[in-house]
Image (spheres, rainbow, N blue to C red):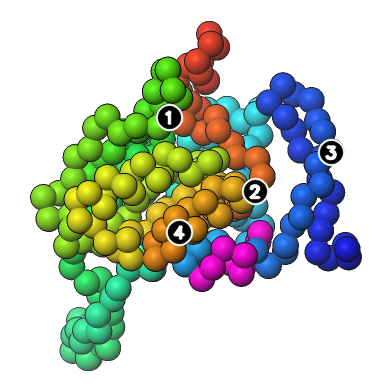
Amino acid sequence: MGNSDAAVKKLPMQNGNTTNLTLLVNENSTENGTEEYGSNLKILPANDVIRELQTILRDRTTSRSDFKFYADRLIRLVIEESLNQLPFTKCVITTPTGCQYDGLKYQKGNCGVSIVRSGEAMEQGLRDCCRSIRIGKILVESDVDTHEARVVYAKFPDDIAKRKVLLMYPIMSTGNTVIKAIAVLKEHNVLEENIILSNLFCTPFAAKTLVTAFPKMKILTSEIHAVAPNHFGQKYFGCRERGVSKKYN
């Protein structure tokens, strides 16, 4: 096995220790390509700016104010690229100098849906790009006894079945929460091919699970990595973690 095909990486574990894990890292799939996951999964083109943002968000020494600031920057980049997956129509406009310009405009009928709570962090980024867009919500919780994900609340635009849906969820470790959310969208007659999943960090397991379960859905993420920053929601909103008394500040 050549060095260009695989690498051994030392990854931090939750208890602060490190362990050597042999990860098969396909350079094309992890940074730029989607061969392993199909053409409907897209990763933001890798550059130093994006890698710096990812580094800051993963760094445990990052303050909450810095975390939120840089998270919003990465969210904006992901949202902008997600919007690029929506359909456009050609149009001709007249400039202030009277010239004709052949341009593009979004087709009508788009909406956002955030998976509460961490998905709500992405709502402002979407509103900053689409001022009047309608946004629905889905709340998925883990059952105390079975630990299975279950939907406890869903609120959508009445005509969501006719719309393209930008589903927002920043961290995907297993994909189970997103699977439940998509099941609810399908119950409301949303077509799988009309769903665009906007995500910041995704594990290879979650990516494979979702592209297998929903091959027609488009997915846009900034990174596929074996370790997902699961502290994202708590730190972004300044919440206490379960069993931890300290607050992020």
Q: Are marks 3 and 2 in contact (CB under 8 Å)?
A: no
Q: Are marks 1 and 3 in contact (CB under 8 Å)?
A: no
Distance CA(mark 2)–CA(mark 4)? 15 Å
Q: Which residue is mark 2?
A: 225
The answer to whether any part of residue 51 appears in the image is yes
Residue 20 sits in which quadrant? top right
134 to the left or right of 41? left
Residue shown at the point (27%, 88%) measured from the top left: 102
Q: Which residues are magenta?
A: 30-39
Residue 217 lies in the magenta-colored region: no
Distance CA(mark 1)–CA(mark 4)? 23 Å
Residue 90 is tagged as none
The answer to whether any part of residue 129 appears in the image is no
Mark 4 is surrounded, within 10 Å at the Cα level, by few (under 14), some (14 to 19) or many (20 or more) other residues, namely many
- Of 228 and 142, the residue lying toward us: 142
Q: Are marks 1 and 4 in contact (CB under 8 Å)?
A: no
Q: Which residue is mark 4?
A: 219
Q: What predominant SS class does the magenta segment belong to? A: loop
Mark earlier in primary sequence (4, 3): 3
Amino acid type indicated by mark 2: His
Mark 3 is surrounded, within 10 Å at the Cα level, by few (under 14), some (14 to 19) or many (20 or more) other residues, namely few
Mark 1 or mark 2, which is nearer to you? 1
Q: In the image, residue 64 lies at what x, y percent?
A: 52, 28
Mark earlier in primary sequence (1, 4): 1
Q: Which residue is mark 1?
A: 148
In this picture, is 165 found above or below 125? below
Amino acid type indicated by mark 3: Asn
